[in-house]
Image (spheres, rainbow, N blue to C red):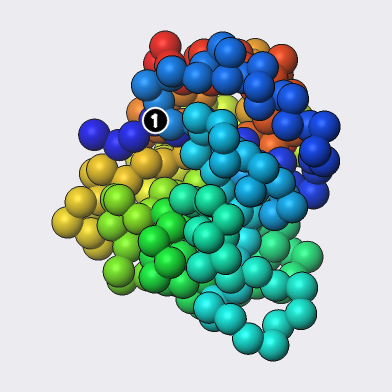
Amino acid sequence: MPRKIAAGNWKMNGVQSTLAELRTLEDKHGDADIAILICPPFTLISACEDTPFDIGGQDCHPEDAGAHTGDISAEMLADAGASYVLVGHSERRTDHGETDALVATKAQAAYDAGLIAVICIGETLDEREGGNTLDVIDAQLEGSVPATADALNTVIAYEPVWAIGTGKVPTTQQIAEVHSHIRTRLSDRFADGAAFSLLYGGSVKGSNAADIFAVPHVNGALVGGASLTAQDFSPIIAALEEA
Ligand code: 13P
């Protein structure tokens, strides 16, 4: 069975005082039997070590070390206390021109450092309106997910670019279509494809979480804005616990 994961991607948000939100979450969900993953900015990873939550980086460099000013390696994330790392987020693909091939090398670097890679994929609005969503998903899965992936080292997050930070959410039918397509493709390619956790991301809120978690093959969410406060993230976690 895929593991249920409520993941928060804080993006470029969060300073020491933000960690108070995690204490509040811990009071409510400290003994949850689903995985709760927090991906804070790199500066807060070590400070999260005393929480009961899984901690992840938001990106890593494909190499272990070297002359790459401003970058961070998977090994460094693991050393700081992370057990996951996001790779291929659409903001990295757009802001930093990351290609599927680069994302695959980052995922491999994550595996080599003992981290679980959360590989993000998703179509733009133009691609959806052009009727190309499933082709884009196929190309991203093929190009970004290494042959060495398995259900223990990899989570796939489907995040339609047009739903991120916009308040626009696909219909549950649209999410169902893509998630079941991803499941089929993973099962075609990997012996344990049925066991990969598949997350939906893009404008998930307390008010829509239960409907999204009821969609087949949705095993959790990757949440941006609504993961920044305990007040907003807690109902999403609660909905996943009940799903
Ligand atoms: P929002 O939840 O703010 O739409 O962001 C989604 C996301 O990009 C998570 O990685």
The foreground one among 19 and 12 is 19
Q: Is residue 82 left or right of 43 when viewed as pictured?
A: left
Q: Which image quarter: residue 206?
A: top right
Residue 93 visible in the snapshot? yes
What crowding class fits label 1: few (fewer than 14 Cα within 10 Å), some (14-19), or many (20 or more)?
A: many
Asked where in the image residue 171 lies, by quadrant, the reply is top right
31 sits to left or right of 91: left
Identify the residue at horizontal 53%, vertical 78% (top origin).
Answer: 64
Task: Give the residue number, with chain letter if any, for mark 1.
Answer: 4
- In the depicted structure, whether residue 201 falls above or below residue 72: above
For the C terminus, the image quarter is top left
Q: Secondary structure at mark 1?
A: loop
Amino acid type of disc 1?
Lys
Residue 61 position within the rendered picture, expressed as x and y whole percent measured from the top left: 60, 73
> How many numbered tags mark residues here?
1
Q: Percent from the top left, x then y, of residue 86?
A: 56, 54
168 sits left or right of 216 in the view: right
2 relative to 26, above or below:
below
Q: Which percent across, then down, holds residue 8?
A: 62, 36
Of 107 and 192, the residue lying toward us: 107
- Residue 10, compared with residue 218, is above or below; it is below
Residue 177, position in %: x, y?
A: 43, 38
